[in-house]
Image (cartoon, rainbow, N blue to C red):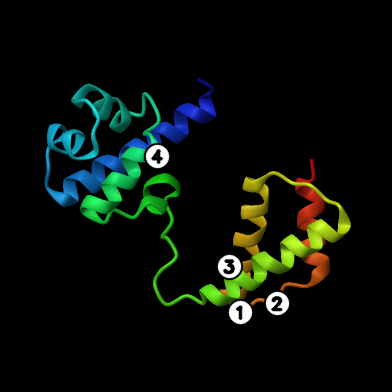
Amino acid sequence: MTQNDADMFAEVGARLAISRSEIGVSQAAMAEAIGVSHRAYHSYEKGKRGIPVEALIKMHGRYEVDVAWLLLGTRSIRVGHDFEALKRIETSLDQYLESAGIKIKSEKRGAIVARWYQSRIEGREVTDDDVHTWIELVRE
């Protein structure tokens, strides 16, 4: 595990502990609720290993924990956002990539869409040149 991984796991672990404490359950109870062993859950909070996506989904479903905050320390997209605009942004990007014959990894595509959408909801204009620059930065 690299130092960056260790730091990331430690940060996620700290947020897991905070969330669990706010919910008011023990490590053992949280482990049972998300389908992992107590030992495994303890290692997540201690930052010794990463928590599986499946466990995060169960935690969100059972306790309405903000998974974006757990993983990144940021709030997730809230209800009331313009999901139609998000779909239009995704469609437009996909059409451009296909027409230009550009291939990028799905996580890079997601990052571009997220950045584009975040700018939109904050009222900042994003030009085609901005998007083309972002694409060039993530091309395979």
Sequence order check: which comes first, mark 2 or mark 3? Answer: 3
Across and down, in percent, residue 59 comes to: 27, 46
Q: What type is the residue that disc 3 sits on?
A: Gln
Q: Dot 3 lies on which element? A: helix
Quarter-wise, where is residue 128 in the image?
A: bottom right
Q: Amino acid at mark 2?
A: Glu
Element type where label 2 sits in the image? loop
Verify CB contact (< 8 Å) between mark 4 and mark 3.
no
**Gap between marks 1 and 4 measured at Cα:** 32 Å
Quarter of the image that includes the C terminus: top right
Residue at mark 2: 125
Q: Which residue is mark 3?
A: 118
- Single out the residue that lies furthest toward the right: 100
Q: Which quadrant would residue 139 be assigned to in this image?
A: top right
Circle 4 sits on which residue?
Answer: 53
- Residue 125 relative to residue 139: left or right: left
Query: Secondary structure beneath disc 1?
Result: loop
Dot 2: within a 10 Å radius of its alpha carbon, few (fewer than 14), some, or many (20 or more) residues? few
The amino acid at mark 1 is Gly
